[in-house]
Image (spheres, rainbow, N blue to C red):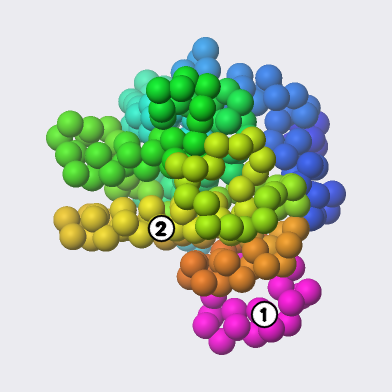
Amino acid sequence: IDAFSELADHTVYQRFDNFNSKYSPFRMSKMRQIFLKTENCLRGRYFAELTKIVLARHEASKGHNSAAEMRLSIYGMERTEWLQLAKWILRDWRNDDYPGPVLSSHNRWMVQVPRLWRIYYKKGGRAQSAEEEKRSFQGMLENLFCPIIEATLRPEENPEIAELLTHIVGFDSVDDEGAAEEPFDCTRPLEWTQEKNPAYCWQLYYLWANIEVLNVLRKSRGLNTFAFRPHAGETGDTMHLAATYMLCPCIAHGINLDRQVSLQYLYYLDQVGLSI
């Protein structure tokens, strides 16, 4: 780990640039693409085998119960992402030591959604209108949620995604909270067609709203539902924590609560969980 420069040490504290660079071995994005991605020339095989080794260690723990809540990303660039991820997790990896899918009784999967609107605007996804070059935030939301809503409504037509959803417990929202963003307003997703980043609170609301609709639908069909536990309050505007207080039962980080005592007290009164 030291040689790869991937250790999460004090240098990543409130420094998203350092944190992000440690995602890649030797700080080289191509190394991450080759070894730590689900979609590459290896079809994600190295990453799958590495993950299964970690899961096996949890399962073999002696004298104590050890479990994990691992995360995988859905970017919202294309509608095919959910199917690709489902095939990677459910594929029977024919390995002598660790065969079978990337599933374990000692792990539940979280799906993290990076806030990458500017990348989607420039090169991600297909246009949602007759004007090929015009992309809206609505298109990104549809890429994120249409496949899983369709799998909930018609599981027989989308068996891989429907099966994957039974192993997912929640959604996370991640990215640099300190990045420049536009002021919060009442623009609808279909109308957001500019390159600038929408406000953190605005993006979080539409993620929450779609997850709520999905949960109501799945609950009516007797299926598992999903928590919403975004990263919040690590850096950036402390008012991000006001949005998560209203929308989420628990969050990741929340370090900036020490700058906003009134919010800290509200989090305590309502027992909004923090994972730091």
Q: Is residue 263 magenta?
A: yes
Q: Which residue is mark 2?
A: 209
Is 12 left or right of 118, judged from the image as shown?
A: right
Circle 1: element type: helix
Q: Position of residue 153 (x, y in %)?
A: 19, 44
Q: Which residues are magenta?
A: 255-276
Marker disc for residue 39 = none
Q: Is residue 207 visible?
A: yes
Residue 48 or 135: which is nearer the viewer? 135
Question: Of the residues shown, which amino acid type is indicated by label 2?
Answer: Ala
Q: Position of residue 104 (x, y in %)?
A: 39, 45
Q: Position of residue 249 (x, y in %)?
A: 48, 70
10 Å neighbourhood of mark 1: few (<14), some, or many (≥20)? some
Residue at image location 46% in from the left, 22% down from the top: 131
Residue at image location 38% in from the left, 55% down from the top: 211
Marker disc for residue 264 = 1
Identify the image quadrant of the C terminus. Answer: bottom right
Residue at image location 61% in from the left, 22% down from the top: 33
Residue 62 or 44: which is nearer the viewer? 44
Q: Residue most toward the right?
A: 11
Residue 82 or 122: which is nearer the viewer? 122
Q: Is residue 225 magenta?
A: no
